Amino acid sequence: MSELTVAVADGDATRRGRQIGRAFDSLINRSLEFYHRYFERRGISSPELQDLLTPHLAAAETSMPELLATVRGMAEGAMVPFMELFAVNAFEELEPLLKPVNGKPLFLETKEGHVSSKEHCSTFTVAGPGFGLLGHSEQWLAGDNGNVGVVIERSGNGRTAIASPTIVGCLPAVGLNAHGGAQGIQSLAASDDTAGVPRVLVSRHALEARNRQDAEERAGLKGRAGGYGFTYLFRGGDAFTVETTATRETVLDGPGPHTNHYTDPGLAELGPSPSEGSRARYDRLQLLLKERSIETPEAVMEVLRDHGSAPQSICLHPDEAEGDEAEGVVFSMVCDVEAARMWVAPGLPCRTPFEEVDLGGVV
């Protein structure tokens, strides 16, 4: 029996959101129960949440009204408060503004309280004659374990068809599109992070990229709150990563790995030193890509299952002692851009089988 819940959406932005919200109804409600606990531990009430989010909401309304309409539609479909769902989509902007609990660092914060590399997500690409593959592991809070689905958005109303595994309360960020492009996302932090369009909305916008030029323009959306690593692979072998901060961007050419620190020397000056986790995963990926012949989806899956750099492994398991605020892999994805196929493991990939996603209506 499949563990994947799939939402298929079409029509205008609001209709798409309602269809996704209805399909993920129970999962979205379960996910929001976790975030309620998370915010309550930090003494954040709904009015305070709205005050913190208002600058980001205003920026999104100005720059990305259609995507905001999709989030509103999702809230309607799942019958949950819009602002609470928007908070999940702006979590990376919101979380650094919150207070630690019992002296424990926040999910996106160092123990020193400085800006830090954000400890989640690893992506890599491999390409050669006849093959082009992207592997991605989504690291997130354990409270969202099981709250994963796949969104299939069909073309129409000026939108490109996409297929994307995602945490159900969030807009799609990683996946495959109808132009033969695959995208993986890695969180980054820099000193110019500001109030602006939430990163998740920027990544959803970038997921529809037609080619390299379009990808660079979408990832470099003006008015964004902060940066990401946007790792791309297009049919035909064009592989590259766009690293962004809130105000700057650069392109790193060629296939390879990316984790949660800037590799461009100029942008690295704006970011923190690589964290232990980000560096360990990056170095391990580099080693595996050098040592192994990775030319098949199965070979990519094996890399995503790897524990060789434990305790900071590619297949990161949550620390049970940290409860629902522990960090671990909540899903993994493999995209074959030449064959137009996708596989998703909705959980730890060493324990959860990869399931192929039906891409009918997408490619």
Image: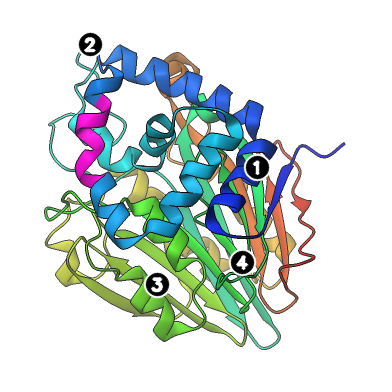
Q: Is residue 267 above or below residue 197?
A: below
Query: Magenta residues?
Result: 49-56
Secondary structure, mark 1, is: strand
Q: Is residue 134 above or below residue 303?
A: below
Q: Which mark is residue 149?
A: 1
For marks 3 and 4 on the same chain, the one whose residue lies earlier in the sequence: 4
For marks 4 and 1 on the same chain, the one whose residue lies earlier in the sequence: 1
User: Pointer 4: residues within 10 angstroms few (<14), some, or many (20+)?
Assistant: many
Which residue is at 22% across, 23% downward? 48
Residue 356 is left or right of residue 81, and the answer is right
Residue 131 is left or right of residue 246, and the answer is right
Which residue is at 40% across, 85% downward? 213
Residue nearest the viewer, comparing 120 with 287: 120
Q: Which residue is mark 3?
A: 241
Q: Is residue 239 above or below residue 149?
A: below
**In this orientation, does residue 341 appear?**
yes
Q: CA distance from mark 3 to mark 4?
A: 15 Å
Q: Amino acid at mark 2?
A: Asn
In the image, residue 308 lies in the stretch drawn in magenta: no
Q: Which residue is mark 2?
A: 102
User: Pointer 2: residues within 10 angstroms few (<14), some, or many (20+)?
Assistant: few
Of tags 3 and 1, the one toward the viewer is 1
Q: Amino acid at mark 3?
A: Thr
Q: Amino acid at mark 1?
A: Gly
Q: CA distance from mark 2 to mark 1?
A: 33 Å
